[in-house]
Image: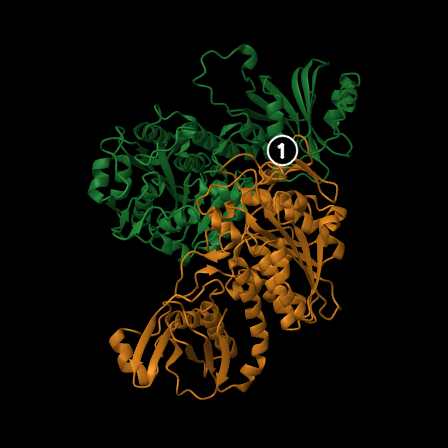
Chain colours: A green, B orange
Amino acid sequence: MLDVSFAAPALPASGALALLVREGAEPGGLWKAADEATGGAVGRAFAAAEFTGKEGQTCTLLAPGAGLSRVVAVGLGKDAPTERRLEDAGGALAAALSREPSAAVAADGLTGAQAMQVALGAALRAYRFDIYRTRIKPDEQAKFAALTVLTDAADAAATWPAQAALVRGVFVARDLASEPANVLTPVEMANRIEKLRELGLGVEVMKPARMAELGFGALLGVAQGSANEARMVIISWNGGEAGEKPVAFIGKGVTFDTGGISIKPAAGMEDMKWDMAGAAAVTGLMAALAGRRAAVNAVGLVGLVENMPSGTAQRPGDVVHSYSGQTVEVLNTDAEGRLVLADVLWYCQQKFDPKFMVDLATLTGAIIVALGHEHAGVFSNDDDLTGKLLAAGLATGEKLWRLPMGREYDKLLKSDIADMKNIAGRPGGSITAAQFLARFVNEKTWAHLDIAGTAWATKDQPVWPKGATGFGVRLLNRLVADHFEAG
Amino acid sequence: MIPRIDFTGAADGFSVRAVAVRAGQVPAECAAVSAAAGFSGEADTVCDVLGGAGRILLVGTGADPGVADYEAAGAAAASRALRSTELAIDVRGLREDAAVGCLTGALLRAWRYENLFSAPPEDAPRLARVVGITDDHGLELRWAEHAAVLEGVTFARDLVTEPSNTLTPEGFVARLHQLAAAGVEPKLLRGAALREAGLTGLLAVGGGSAHPPALAVLRWRGDGAAPTVAFVGKGITFDTGGICIKPAEDMWEMRADMAGAAACAGAMLALARRRSPAPAIAVLALAENATGAASYRPGDVLRHAGGTTIEVVDTDAEGRLVLADALGWVLREKPAAVIDLATLTGSVVTALGHEMAGLFSNDDVLAEAVMTAGKAVGEPVWQLPIDASHRDAISSEIADLRHCSPLRGQPDACHAAAFLREFVGAVPWVHLDIAGVESRAEASDRYAKGATGWGVRLLDRLVRDRFEGPGRA
């Protein structure tokens, strides 16, 4: 990840410089210094480009003199910049500096917290997943690796390590979601999670034999069509008071979802490699909490399976016995995520009696038809937890929109031969999926995040390049930091 | 039609009598039979007792019933008494809102549309009269205002049910005489007047049909002492999809694609019948979206009366075009608030199913008021977002806007709302996407099958709570 350091404001003698410009405001000291050192080239170039500092505006000036290779200006807009806008500006400067191995950003005039926010945005945007590209041409190679934040705010450097841990957590999630499914099988994903023990996390991996013994009929039913064995991984971080109940996060980890016997159409099926983005986010979140030594007890549980059609695959019409004891008629094998989550949710509340459970899942296409790609859906049995989640979403830019639940929707799950069926038709499809999950939380405080529309970006956004977003890591880290950490 | 209602103080002499029973409070006279039937007054349960004094329906309301539970109880009683000609409901001892709830629920559940049967089928409902047994003479005196709302709901349901060969735009206009009789002032824009007003969307959408489009403006002056509240309704009397024609399966349901306009008209009827002091106006965009030689095409660009150019992507997204015209038109009235109702998108059905309508708004206060009103009358709505990405999705390469996204599987309900928002200026506005709640596929204890009249009661309640009385907006 981007190597971020902090230094006192002074014009660098060489390399690239980024300037943050408020629209209509007097230019900062470093802006003036750069302009003077280049004989007025900076000011003239920005005037010629009609750069005024409008929000989202950027302008790049190559080799303006004074030893500088590149000067990038990023607009912050008129009003006092919000967290969101500073982060976006950091993202924009990282994008504009992708060819520079290193750069400095002038954060004079910003508080330490604001400067840190810019660095966070830059680090998040500078993510790359190019391990499978063996022939990148030098002129296509993204080089941006180090950012020096020029600030005299003493607290900026002190707060960065926690942010860096958060960024690393986001990248853990993005890396996992980006990996192709022939590499990232359930076993491989479990192996990678085990490596996170080095951060101080507890990691326990449960294999199919043990799950069968416990009676995970719903999860194992999904897994039975694949040559790749299922795993459940329990990740724990004990940074809080000994004996205090943990907070719990549960992720859907379908490492590839063909749909099973209810097979999906071919077009777009490649997207199903990231049908484990919920599990990836839980993993990334746990890494972030450990990385910043969060003062909380937390558990993360991920159910890892591959959903394949085969001679051993489960069929539409099969009835499975879930770990909760409830039976489920599987009418569509492509509604598999909820089956996996059902057993993991039930296990989680039985085993840990957590303060609350939040699950993340790329669960339904219907959530995209409902909300699109800017908000993830949140469903919950608890208004207080929902309010905290919505606020954390606004604070981090990982936005949520609440959708309803209720008895009338729950009724639609009625099966003729089992306790419930696993689908209830297109109308209200995301809601009935949530109602299904609600039957497996044993009335614990719980929220379900349907992230099918937000886990993957089809084009670049300010703080994430095209591809896996790591959606959920920052959101839930913020939830924990704001409400569930001692001190 | 719905049964007529009468009131009496005498409980005897009815062949079918219903009583709402709170959990654990079964009347002593029925204790033995209730115990045998396992009935204790829980919600959604009914005990049907046949005895010497006739048939008694004990209807459970649960332990702590609200108005909605009493409505459900009345409906459950009616659903079991549909084959009788008369149902008496004993509301003695109930609070007035509970009594009204019981009777309202029963009357709405007993609604049916019989106009087109040569002779009613043998198993057709026959319930023609509901009798409220009450000690309170005031209830009958005050019933007129409830009857007004029921008349509005019935009017809307009948319109939604009527087939499109008779309910053409002109047919719809003809039905509005009932409103004129109640004191609503109708005004019609057709042909040249539509062209003059620049209602290009309505003209384009209606252009393919042999039955030309019309804009119906319904005005209720109230006491004239406050700003007007405006309703705007989508009134596509039949929607083939136009050149982007729909699949044949279930296309017949598109006769209900004027349910928004029907709800607005029904609400106006209710306000007029109960002599509401609130000035109100309803603008109904009436057109048939047919496939014809003069149909508008995908790729056409329309110029809205306000100047905005609109690229047509899919002729089956016609509702938002006629609404844009009606919304733009109604702004000249300087309304205090605008609420539009439309069976607009399949997307909202995927999002919310058949239990709630989708709400979109540019004004939190009005949105909250609409949600509160909907909850109070059992027409719940849920707010959905209009975010930046939704607005981006309706940017056009060659015009100011395109009216929908060409991609599939997208949040079309949100896109449609983002589109409509472009035409309401700064006026507080709520858009209700009522696709999915305008009719019910199955009859149940609670609801009749078919048209619901969804929105009439919500709008009436909203006006009552927010636009009447001293604190009105």
Q: Secondary structure at mark 1?
A: loop
Where residue B431 appears, x then y in whole percent?
A: 60, 52
| Badge 1: residue crowd in 10 Å (few <14, some 14–19, many ≥20) | some
**Residue A83 appears anywhere in the view:** yes
Q: Residue at x 36, y 76 (%)?
A: B58
Percent x, y of residue A226: 27, 30
Image position of B322 (left or right of B125):
right
Q: Which residue is mark 1?
A: B299
Which quadrant of the figure contains the C terminus of chain B? bottom right
Left or right of A15 on screen, residue B343? left
Q: Amino acid at mark 1?
A: Gly
Corner quadrant of residue B467: bottom right
Quarter-of-image position of residue B70: bottom left
The residue at 33%/40% (across/down) is: A336
**Along the viewing direction, whichever of A335 and B175 lies nearer the viewer:** B175
Residues A368 and A246: in front is A368
The answer to whether one can see residue B463 in this image is: no
Apparent side of residue B431 relative to residue A41 in the rendered image (left or right): left
Chain name for mark 1? B
Up-down relation of residue A40 to residue A411 (above or below): above
The spot of residue B33 in percent (x, y) is 27, 79
Towards the viewer: B267 or A370 = B267
- Location of residue B81 with respect to B283 vertically, above or below: below
Percent of width and height locating residue A90: 61, 30
Report the number of discs.
Answer: 1
